[in-house]
Image (cartoon, rainbow, N blue to C red):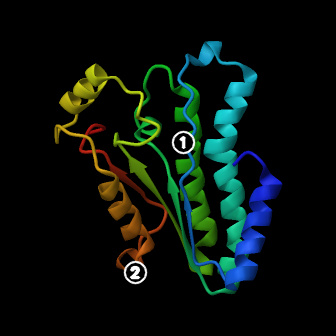
Amino acid sequence: MSDPQSLRDFVIGVNRRLGRIDLLINNAGLLHQELGLTMSAAAVSGVINVNLVGPITLANACTRPMSRAGGGVIVNVSSINAVRGYRGVSVYSAAKAGLDGFSRSLARELGELNIRVNTVVPGYFDSDMTARVTDENRRRIKHRTPLRRLASVDEIADATLFLCSSGSSFVTGQSLIVDGGITC
């Protein structure tokens, strides 16, 4: 995700093999937990590149083939950290908030080309990124979440599939928060 040319080459290769691109789900995530004041420039750059610059590059590369095919769907995967900051993830939060803003603006730019752009904003769920969350912190997260549990991967996937489906054909520029109510 941090090599723009390889991302563009990937999109070109997919378009050549399949003859069109209808859907892009930008599901990149790199979390570096550290106070923003102490993060190295390299760590900041890495988090921003993977979580924001890479998805922007992929979305831009997919736009031409989608427009030639008569439309498409882009779903960017953000994070509740973009909605509600937490200590130690300020740079990650900034990148994901930037992705949300990018999605809303891109939806306005691409709507007339019949390309819908939305964001799914997952809360806490079991993943590689949350594997190191301690049992005590999991208990706290569950306690702060109105539904009193973490999401399943399937629940996040279902929300993403909805944004990709014809059932959301008049939805663009929106952020669908799937967090069990922790941000409300």
Amino acid type assigned to the residue bearing label 2 in the image: Ser
Q: Quadrant of the C terminus?
A: top left
When the figure is inspected, residue 44 is found, relative to residue 87, above or below; the finding is below
Viewer-proximal residue among 50 and 98 = 50
Label 1 element class: helix
Residue sitting at x 67%, y 83% = 18
Residue sitting at x 78%, y 62% = 8
Amino acid type assigned to the residue bearing label 1 in the image: Lys
Residue 86 rendering spot, x and y as whole percentages:
43, 25
When the figure is inspected, residue 152 is found, relative to residue 73, above or below; the finding is above
Mark-to-mark CA distance, 2 and 1: 26 Å
Residue 154 rendering spot, x and y as whole percentages:
32, 58
What label does residue 124 carry, if any?
none
Instruction: Tell me the quarter of the picture where residue 92 sits.
Output: top right
Residue 175 horizontal side relative to residue 178, left or right: right
What label does residue 166 carry, if any?
2
Q: Residue furthest top?
A: 38
Quickly name the residue at label 1. Answer: 96
Q: Earlier in the sequence, mark 2 or mark 1?
A: 1
Viewer-proximal residue among 150 and 176 = 150
Label 2 element class: helix
